Amino acid sequence: MADPGDAELFMGPQPSEKREMSDEQFREEMRKTQAALQQLWQEEGKSRAQDFNLAQIIIRFLSQPENTDLFLLISRVVAQDIPSELILAVISLTDPVAAKQVKSLLAGVPTKALTVTSPSGMESLSPESKKEIDQWIMVINMAANQKPHRTLESLLKRKRAETGVPVVYELSTALVQLGAFVLRNYLAHHNFSPEFERLHDFMQAVFVELVKQLETAVQEQKRIGASK
């Protein structure tokens, strides 16, 4: 097994991305990403080996020139403790290695579909591509339901609220954006370029429905636990 320090071989995003923030902010993002990935290797037993492999796939994905624009988004979702299986599921639409690993991880897992209307502008997309996107959404849902409690907690963050005001939770904007960018890259490869806002709204709808399913699953687990 490689040493966790191997992650340092990944040099991060290209200069065009680095211009979006100061050098200090960029170094801080890199530090947070390395620290978050390091946590993946601190698990015990089988889970540690599995998380190490998943983290290596994520690093390999980011090291490809065509994916460096996703570095900041992935660093943020990793820092939010979003399960690595879910991150892999999101990038699996455009990464064969991630797709193969996710397929292996989810082998034998019951199929879970989400009903979300496809974004406009994709009507002329080939049936094969539409099917791939539908299967991708299904894989995202299946991966999320592997660890419903942890996934739900990582997807929803408490927003600061005034005294006496009900607590408000906010869906992870980084994960929604990551999904939208991955979908955009997939469609661009098939010579489609819908407005990014439409893709973002679509992924927002996907994760909202996903959260609803996770909340139902968590409540059901609590009910079963209380009845024992």
Image (spheres, grey):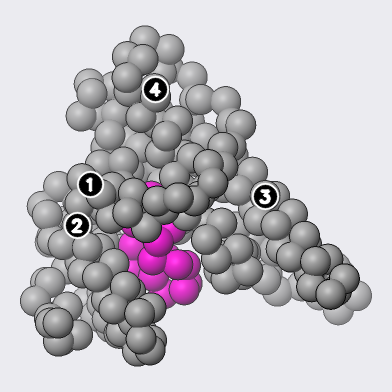
Judging from the image, what secondary structure is the residue with disc 1 in?
A: loop
Q: Which residue is mark 4?
A: 130
Main SS, magenta residues: helix
- The residue at the point 40 percent across, 61 percent down is 85
Verify whether residue 200 appears in magenta. Answer: no
Q: Which residues are magenta?
A: 74-91
Q: Residue at x 64, y 43 (%)?
A: 209
**SS category of the residue bearing label 4:** helix
Q: Which mark is residue 213?
A: 3
Disc 2 residue type?
Answer: Phe
Q: Amino acid at mark 1?
A: Asp
Residue 132: which disc? none
For marks 1 and 3, give the CA distance: 26 Å
Q: Which of the two discs, 1 and 3, labels the residue nearer the N terminus?
A: 1
Q: Which mark is residue 61?
A: 2
Label 1 and label 4: CA atoms lie apart by 17 Å
Task: Specify few, some or many for label 2: CA neighbours under 10 Å numbering under 14, 14-19, or 20 or more.
Answer: many
Q: Based on the picture, tell me whether residue 88 belongs to the magenta stretch.
A: yes
Q: Earlier in the sequence, mark 1 or mark 2?
A: 2
Picture layout, residue 193 above or below residue 14: above
The percent coordinates of residue 62 (x first, y second) are: 19, 60
Which residue is label 1 attached to?
95
Q: Are marks 1 and 2 in contact (CB under 8 Å)?
A: yes
Q: Are marks 2 and 3 in contact (CB under 8 Å)?
A: no
Residue at figure coordinates x 37%, y 58% from the top left:
105
